[in-house]
Amino acid sequence: MLNLQTLDPEEIRGLTDEQFRELMSGVVGISQEDRKQNAVLYYKPVSKKAQTAHDSKSKVLCISGGNGSGKSEVALTELVMCATGVFPYSQRHLIEQKFRGPIQTRLVVQSLTTTLETIIIPKLQWWKWTGVDQQGGERGHWGWIPKDCLIDGDWQRSWNAKLRLLKVLCRDPNRPEKILGESSIQCMSFDQDPSDFASGDYHLIVHDEPPNLAIWRENEARTMRVDGRLLLAMTWPDDPSINVDWLYNEVYEPGKNGD
């Protein structure tokens, strides 16, 4: 098997067509595997508005859009890059602004069974494909947590199903071979009692759709001592009878630091 790293320009020019095809096949295979194991590196926002969300310095940020608009992916990649230190090539300009080293994070979803297990967790597992195209296509991505950020590269070593807690290695964004410590991602759901949320300090809390006001306020309190951030990815309800006054008052009230 030819190795591009060991060949000088003269040797490459002297390859036969068959040898060159073999060499390029190996290069493509390595690139595809890297995109699989380090999908977050290759993440690109779906729109300028999505990039605006990443660029925001707000402590309270709402990312809204219709179904399939990519709002959840924006929130998840924001969480992953801040927790692992692995910033996408497209987001390297945010390292100084957003990287704090190993952090404690919380991810709040609608349901542990119908949302977390079936939708969210596969979006984080590096070997799972999410998208409308076939694996490796343009419209989709592999799981966002890099394999090298799992303990011993093993999901089972990193994920505690009983506690619904994922521990990931936090790497130096500028020296990825250097491990700075461990970050944690605690997964919770709206059907839990608000008192379950009333402990710990969290640097980043992501909500996938709006929780009830009691849960929101508990999470807000958890970020205060560590100058943390609250992210909310949501689809505005079609039913006008649904009361979202608390969301406006808590997140959008003029003069507050939310976007």
Image (tube, rainbow, N blue to C red):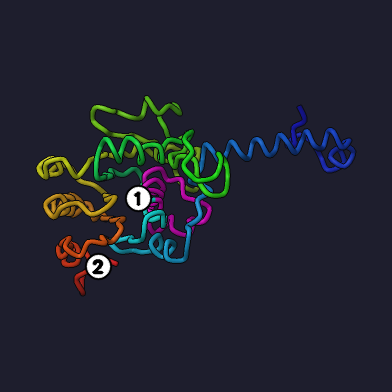
> Mark 2 = which residue?
257
- Looking at this view, name the residue that lies furthest to the bottom: 254
Mark 1 neighbour density, 10 Å: few (under 14) some (14–19) many (20 or more):
few
The number of discs equals 2
Q: Identify which residue is drawn at 36% across, 59% down.
A: 66
Look at label 2 and name its amino acid: Asn
Dot 1 or dot 2: first in sequence order is 1
Q: Nearer the viewer, residue 77 or 211?
A: 211
The answer to whether residue 162 is left or right of residue 78 is left
Q: Position of residue 22 (x, y in %)?
A: 78, 33
Is 120 included in the stretch rendered in magenta? Answer: no
Numbered mark located on residue 201 in the image? none
Task: Say if residue 204 shows up in the picture.
Answer: no
Position of the N terminus, as image quadrant, is top right
Q: Main secondary structure of the magenta part?
A: helix
- Side of 213 where 139 appears, left or right: right
- Residue plotted at (81% across, 39% down): 8
- Disc 2 element: loop
Which circle marks residue 100 in the picture?
1
The reply, left or right, for residue 60 in relation to residue 3 is: left
Image x and y of residue 11, in percent: 86, 37
Give amino acid for label 1: Arg
Magenta stretch, residue numbers: 73-99
Q: Is residue 83 in the magenta section?
A: yes
Residue drawn at (40%, 59%) of the image: 54
